[in-house]
Image (cartoon, rainbow, N blue to C red):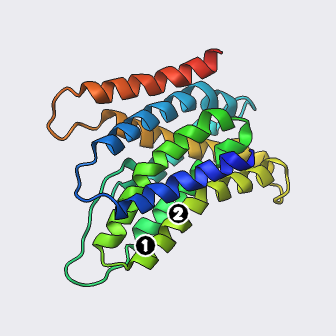
């Protein structure tokens, strides 16, 4: 992965989180459209690229680890309050509360999302993950501020979140090259966990209802565009 791709992956999350200081209120229609597009794009990339590659080594247990990843994401969301989907929930009752569970689960989520980039899918995944992290980082910043964190601490934790995906990429690169013990032989299974997480995140974004439970043409267009670009990259 080139330097500009690493910068893009880092800066999208950082700027998405810092934008919380510029926008007020909870009605962020543009962020919702970005989330819909990125969810559809990640779903397309997962089905067209990641799943076939994970089964390329003829490991019949990969499917089990995909299920593990899917269930693991459900577990993480019990602590993250669905921030991965751009949901914003604050629980400040007049005192400072650091959302430790949200921070840990979201950083782990971003770290795992960065791992598939090392397997030759930079062009397909880098933009999808970068777009996906914009609303997630914005939601994280909103939660931190809403729970009484100072401006400087909020910036620090957003920066920490932004570092996680590039860190996952470097860890995955070392893993696939055999630089970390003998874990390389289990790489497809680890990718199975990541695939399960991607499937849960993307399908949740795609199938959750709109706030007014009405047909949303803009969201449909964003979803079709995301799937279409993923399919075009696969065919071309």
Residue placed under numbered mark 1 in the picture: 154
Q: Residue at x 49, y 43 (%)?
A: 131
Q: Residue at x 51, y 55 (%)?
A: 13
Q: Picture coordinates of residue 76 (x, y %)? A: 43, 58
Q: Residue at x 35, y 37 (%)?
A: 33
Residue placed under numbered mark 2 in the picture: 161
Asked whether residue 29 appears in the rendered view, the answer is: yes
Asked whether residue 67 appears in the rendered view, the answer is: no
Q: Nearer the viewer, residue 107 or 136?
A: 136
Q: Residues within 10 Å of mark 2 (few under 14, many from 20)?
A: many
- Label 1 or label 2, whichever lies nearer to me, is 1
Q: Residues within 10 Å of mark 1 (few under 14, many from 20)?
A: many
Distance Cα–Cα, label 1 vs label 2: 11 Å
Q: How many marks?
A: 2
- Callout 1 touching callout 2 (CB < 8 Å): no
Q: Is residue 107 above or below residue 112?
A: below
Q: Nearer the viewer, residue 51 or 25?
A: 25
Q: Picture coordinates of residue 225 (x, y %)? A: 44, 24
The quadrant of the picture occupied by the C terminus is top right
Q: Secondary structure at mark 2?
A: helix
The quarter holding residue 77 reads bottom left
Q: Nearer the viewer, residue 38 or 150?
A: 150
Q: Earlier in the sequence, mark 1 or mark 2?
A: 1
């Amino acid at each position: 992965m080139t330097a500009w791709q690493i910068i893009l992956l880092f800066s999208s999350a950082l700027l998405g989180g810092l934008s919380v200081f510029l926008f007020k209120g909870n009605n962020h229609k543009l962020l919702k459209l970005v989330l819909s597009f990125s969810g559809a794009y990640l779903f397309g990339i997962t089905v067209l690229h990641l799943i076939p590659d994970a089964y390329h080594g003829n490991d019949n247990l990969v499917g089990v680890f995909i299920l593990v990843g899917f269930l693991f994401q459900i577990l993480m969301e019990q602590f993250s309050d669905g921030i991965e989907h751009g949901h914003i929930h604050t629980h400040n009752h007049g005192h400072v509360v650091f959302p430790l569970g949200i921070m840990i689960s979201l950083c782990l989520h971003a770290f795992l999302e960065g791992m598939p980039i090392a397997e030759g899918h930079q062009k397909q995944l880098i933009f999808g993950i970068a777009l996906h992290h914009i609303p997630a980082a914005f939601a994280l910043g909103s939660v931190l501020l809403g729970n009484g964190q100072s401006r400087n601490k909020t910036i620090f934790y957003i920066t920490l979140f932004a570092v996680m995906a590039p860190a996952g990429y470097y860890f995955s690169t070392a893993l696939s090259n055999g630089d970390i013990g003998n874990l390389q032989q289990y790489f497809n299974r680890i990718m199975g966990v990541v695939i399960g997480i991607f499937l849960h995140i993307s399908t949740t974004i795609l199938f959750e209802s709109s706030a007014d439970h009405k047909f949303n043409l803009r969201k449909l267009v964003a979803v079709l565009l995301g799937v279409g670009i993923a399919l075009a990259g696969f065919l071309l």
